[in-house]
Amino acid sequence: MAKHAARGAHQRAAWSSKLGFILAGAASAVGLGNLWRFPTLAAKYGGGTFIFTYFVLAFTFGISLLLLETALGRHTRQSVIGAYSDLRPRWKFLGILSAAVPFIITPYYCIIGGWVVKYLTSYVAEGPASVMADGFFGAFITDPFFTYVFMIIFMLLCIIVVALGVKNGIEKANMVMMPLLLVMAVGISVFVLMQPGALEGAKYYLVPDFSKFSPELVINALGQMFYSLSLAMGIMVTYGSYLDRKESLTTSVASIAGFDLVVSFLAGLMIVPAAFMALGLGEGGTMAAGPSLMFVTLPQVFGGMGGAAQVIGIVFFVLVLFAAATSAISLIEACTSIIQDGTHWSRGASLLACSVFVIAAGCFINAGYNALIWMEPLGPGTQLLDFFDFLSNSVMMPIVALFTCIFVGWVMKPKFIIDEVRVSSKFSLAGLWAIMIKVIAPVLVIAILVANVLPMIFPS
Ligand code: TRP
């Protein structure tokens, strides 16, 4: 009894309103994934074709899983380990597996957050020319001292917000950062589209090229959707557990997915035309993937904008910083809440333990760019960060998602989630939703897993 009370409802943090919950979900969803992964994938897979596929998947499959996780959290009032073990003690392993994901992501996410802080300070202090200089990015990320400093600055900023609490820290920070983020994204997109040659790039981004439709596109869109909506890592279970039972889950998750999609779309609208102008993409052109798109290509594009370069560079990296920070804050909150529920320590002690872990693990992974650069865990040229990114997103997330669907769809049966949703709203698509969770989602997830893992086992 005492044990249960300590973990249970009355001691839990809570959102002050539905808006607080939606913004928190959106804050965890909108992040580096929207700003660089989405535009890269969209450019690679025929622009509009990818956007359309992503849209359909997010509003069927993505929303179904979001609903599942938030309802599970609200039903059990536990973060993810407690949520599963309370329902079926033998399924505790699934809680542990989900809980492990944010512990893997947080440290490396904060390393990239540190890069963003570095770019922002360089734009402010030194101006665009230094950031554009050849080799700036490579020289910085392999720096054996300053990368650690910037990573820790970024982590401390996020830790302070979490330390202020769910209502006074996270909610307030989101209330400020999320609307500003949206305004900046619209502003930069408009500015980029006004540049000469940009409309050509926008056409490339928006007009679907259906010849690029392929199973590979679907797999990539699915993977992106998981990552972007922060699914299968326990975070939405935790956030659901802070939500009042009178607030509608269905409209909340639709708003979260909508916010995420809008920011991804805008990110593509600012980045793809910009890169198009700089590189003359189009036929046969390839776009830099991953970090170099944001950290190398874009500064060059901004550099070509004359006097505006510094302002636009600063606004862009403030935008990226907000996106990265709100996601990192969610990640740290998820880890803290898992530690708290598992140990029954105070929130402060749990946050301290989380911080020590995140800093230590961050330093280790960051060493993959300097002291441990010889490691190359996924083959030549790859670093520890790539390894942990692969492990969390390509292996663990699909496994967790698969077991979650089996657990809810076949072991517990979907009814208990449907009932939870119906406590606060109508749910007329419940039948379809159940089919999604029992059949469609597991099949799609197995496809992702096979596509991601097979090439590792049998390299071509
Ligand atoms: N969704 C975030 C992004 O798009 C990244 C992310 C993945 C995340 N898992 C998370 C953020 C968990 C917060 C919590 O960048």
Image (tube, rainbow, N blue to C red):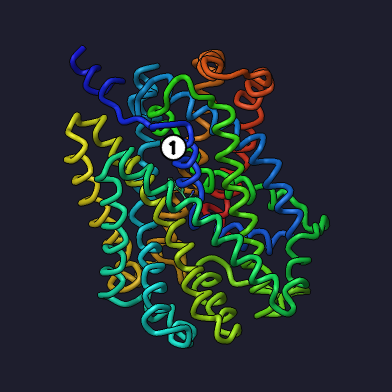
Q: In the drawing, does residue 295 fall left or right of residue 100? A: right
For mark 1, does the 10 Å Cα neighbourhood hold few (<14), some (14 to 19), or many (20 or more) residues?
Answer: many
Q: Position of residue 278 (x, y in %)?
A: 65, 80
Q: Tell me the residue at 39%/69% (across/down).
A: 115
Q: Nearer the viewer, residue 149 or 310?
A: 310
Q: Which residue is mark 1?
A: 20
Question: Relative to residue 415, is residue 435 depicted above or below?
Answer: below
Q: Tell me the residue at 39%/50% (across/down).
A: 105
**Element carrying mark 1:** helix
Q: Position of residue 232 (x, y in %)?
A: 48, 37
Question: Relative to residue 89, is residue 38 depicted above or below?
Answer: below
Q: Nearer the viewer, residue 175 or 21?
A: 175
Q: Tell me the residue at 68%/64% (across/down).
A: 43
Q: Nearer the viewer, residue 37 or 277?
A: 277
Question: Relative to residue 375, is residue 234 depicted above or below?
Answer: above
Q: Position of residue 343 (x, y in %)?
A: 20, 31
Q: Quadrant of the C terminus?
A: bottom right
Q: Quadrant of the N terminus?
A: top left
Q: Tell me the residue at 27%/52% (across/down).
A: 358
Q: Amino acid at mark 1?
A: Gly
